[in-house]
Amino acid sequence: MREVSVVFVTVGNAEDASKIGRALVEEKLIACANIIPRIHSIYWWKGEICDDQECLLIMKTQSSLFPLLKSRIRQLHSYEVPEIIAFPIAQGLPEYLDWVVENTGINPNP
């Protein structure tokens, strides 16, 4: 079984979240994207505290695809420095993890 990761990306609005999620699914860089439409983010940016509404994308992919995924998100994202973080999935339903692998990248073992 290949390693699978969950990837978090924040975006400024639901339209951008949908655009990025759809593009990444179509390109098989992720198996799916869940969009949490409204999160409240408080953070430092360029010496000031910002207090904004954002959307959160939660995506699942093969860990080996992360470098390509990160690069593609940077191309699609409007932020100068987007939040792109990944966590390996330590455990999960094997059938679901297999589904992620089958629906991302090129699978040499169909």
Image: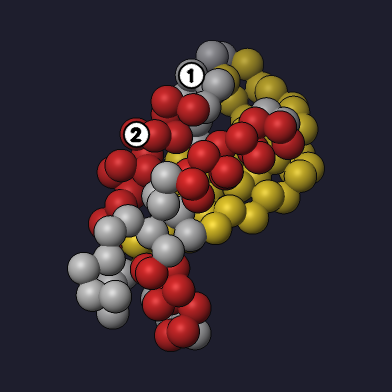
Where the N terminus falls, by quadrant? bottom left
At mark 1, the secondary structure is loop
Query: Residue 54 or 62: which is nearer the viewer?
Result: 62
Camera-nearest label, 2 or 1: 2
* Residue at 46% across, 84% down: 95
Is 78 placed above or below 59 here? above
Where the C terminus falls, by quadrant? bottom left
Badge 2, how many Cα within 10 Å: few under 14, some, many 20+?
few
Q: Is residue 88 left or right of residue 109?
A: right
Task: Residue 14: give x, y in percent of width and height.
Answer: 73, 36
Q: Hey, which residue is sitting farthest front in the picture?
A: 110
The quadrant holding residue 44 is top right
Three-letter code, disc 2: Ser
Residue 71: numbered disc: 2
Q: Which residue is mark 1?
A: 80
* Residue at 39% across, 34% down: 72
Can residue 24 be seen at all in this image of the molecule? yes
* Residue at 27% across, 66% down: 107
Residue 43: numbered disc: none
Query: Residue 16 or 49: which is nearer the viewer?
Result: 16
Is 33 placed above or below 19 here? below
